Image (cartoon, helix red, strand yellow):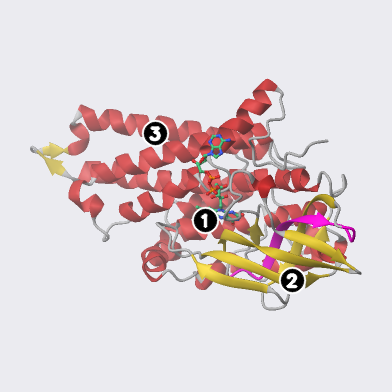
């Protein structure tokens, strides 16, 4: 797939990353899945190719690249290794972009240095009893003298156990116990006492990145750990979740890249595989399947690229990011499933990447806001109503 409207530099970037994806990244993908080991060698590769932290502004050591540049990178990597694609998401979008937009100078420098050195920050929102309804979180930060003491449990935290920098969302209470809003606190694994990785989730796919339960037990941080957007703590969660629109576009891009990779495999195989004395792509049933796959991919790519473009100079538009993620994640599951079908029994074998892709792609209608909750976001934007059933830091005025 290649949508028009890319600059010559973007076409060069895309070609360079596609080469990496087809070479060293593809070679490691099956092993990363089988061993469930975080691919530190791929992190080094991305670092040496200046693909980590590329969206970080130049004054903090990054390259100030656009969301679309990051999207092109993630899309190409995900076609052969979705885990490496996700690492590119989380070192260019999400928590890091929230800190770079709203952090203090000290916080920005620290986060940028960590990411550029190879750290993939973790964002900690979800709790066992507060998933889609993130406002129902019970993790709390109590002000005690000149410190905050944080207690609670988060689960399904991507990178738990490999990430060092954590952006942790908690309900903030002043010294009298009055609720002030939901705030995002920065903490560093192995440095901040009381941050404990307590379980690794056994996942269906995307097995090269751990998903973890993290407990905060009297985790003690100074007020300078709190990231406070300009509208203050009361609107802080909503503002920080606005930064999360970039992560949603990134997640949609991983799904897009996986589906494109699977489609290409099916297209190639359909010419090679002969049955009834002819290539299987001479059967109209399969020709129409290929046509439908390519139509869905073109539409998904346009939604993703447009959502990325909508964010230049700020964050991607909430409506466009939600539309892109719902459409792409749902269609990508279908496309990968169809691609697997082209291979018959071979598609069901672990010797080919299709079954891994089918497991990996299944995640994207869930993580980062489910397809149902994102439909609420879309409906809220269309109706111009602030719906409480979203995950975007809705707060009563
Ligand atoms: C691989 C993976 C990585 C993740 N990484 C992170 C991470 O790094 N950090 C983090 O904080 N979280 C992470 N998550 C958690 C993810 O954001 C949540 O799983 C998601 O928000 C849904 O929450 P839940 O699982 O509790 O489902 P629930 O909220 O319990 O939802 C269950 C079902 O009900 C539906 N539903 C709920 N409310 C509504 C509604 N109002 N209208 C219609 N349907 C509704 C949901 O769509 C879903 O189908 C990750 C999840 C996965 C699978």
Extreme-left residue of the structure = 276
Give the residue number, with chain letter if any, for mark 3.
294
Q: Where is residue 181 in the image (x, y as percent from the top left)?
A: 81, 49
Instruction: Tell me if mark 3 has few (under 14), some (14-19) or many (20+) residues whose alpha carbon lies within 10 angstroms of its own.
Output: some
Residue annotated with mark 1: 85
Choose between 199 and 369: the one closer to the eye. 199
Q: What element carries label 1?
A: helix
| Region rendered in magenta | 161-176
Give the Cα separation between the discs numbered 3 and 2: 50 Å
Q: Which residue is drawn at 18% across and 45% down?
A: 273
Above or below, 136 against 200 in this view is above
Lateral position of residue 384 relative to residue 33, left or right: right
Seen in the picture, residue 80 relative to 276 is either above or below; the reply is below
Q: Where is residue 83 in the image (x, y as percent from the top left)?
A: 48, 59
Left or right: 280, with 83 as reference point:
left
Q: How far apart are marks 1 and 3 (CA)?
A: 21 Å
Classify 10 Å Cα crowding around label 2: few (below 14), some (14-19), many (20 and above).
some
Which circle, 1 or 2, is nearer the viewer?
2
Lower sequence index among marks 1 and 3 = 1
Query: According to the image, label 2 marks what residue?
Result: 219
Q: Does the closest atom of ligand 1 sit within 8 Å of the Cβ of label 1?
A: no
Q: Is residue 288 above or below residue 373?
A: above
């Amino acid at each position: 797939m290649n949508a028009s409207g890319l600059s010559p530099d973007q076409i060069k970037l895309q070609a360079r990353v596609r080469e990496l994806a087809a070479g060293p990244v593809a070679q490691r993908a099956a092993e990363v899945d089988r061993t469930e080991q975080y691919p530190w060698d791929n992190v080094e590769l991305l670092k040496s190719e200046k693909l980590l932290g590329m969206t970080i502004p130049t004054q903090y050591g990054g390259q100030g690249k656009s969301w679309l540049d990051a999207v092109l990178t993630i899309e190409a990597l995900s076609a052969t290794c979705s885990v490496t694609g996700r690492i590119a998401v989380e070192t260019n979008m999400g928590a890091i972009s929230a800190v770079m937009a709203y952090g203090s100078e000290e916080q920005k420098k620290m986060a940028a240095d960590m990411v550029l050195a190879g750290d993939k920050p973790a964002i900690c929102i979800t709790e066992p009893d507060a998933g889609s309804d993130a406002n129902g979180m019970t993790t709390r930060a109590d002000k005690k003298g000149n410190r905050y003491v944080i207690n609670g449990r988060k689960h399904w935290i991507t990178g738990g156990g490999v990430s060092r920098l954590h952006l942790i969302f908690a309900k903030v209470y002043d010294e009298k116990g009055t609720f002030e809003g939901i705030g995002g606190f920065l903490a560093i694994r192995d440095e901040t006492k009381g941050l404990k990785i307590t379980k690794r989730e056994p996942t269906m796919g995307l097995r090269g990145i751990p998903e973890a339960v993290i407990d905060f037990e009297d985790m003690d941080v100074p007020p300078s750990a709190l990231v406070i957007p300009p509208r203050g703590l009361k609107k802080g969660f909503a503002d920080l979740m606005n930064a999360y629109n970039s992560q949603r576009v990134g997640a949609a891009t991983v799904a897009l890249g996986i589906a494109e990779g699977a489609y290409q495999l099916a297209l190639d195989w359909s010419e090679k595989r002969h049955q009834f004395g002819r290539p299987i792509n001479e059967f109209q049933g399969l020709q129409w399947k290929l046509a439908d796959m390519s139509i869905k991919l073109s539409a998904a790519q346009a939604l993703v690229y447009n959502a990325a473009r909508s964010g230049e100079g700020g964050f991607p538009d909430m409506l466009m990011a939600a539309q892109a993620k719902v459409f792409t994640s749902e269609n990508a599951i279908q496309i990968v499933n169809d691609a697997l079908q082209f291979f018959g029994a071979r598609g069901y074998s672990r010797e080919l990447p299709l079954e891994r892709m089918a497991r990996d792609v299944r995640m994207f209608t869930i993580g980062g806001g489910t397809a149902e909750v994102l439909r609420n976001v879309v409906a809220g934007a269309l109706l111009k109503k602030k719906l409480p059933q979203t995950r975007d830091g809705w707060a009563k005025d």
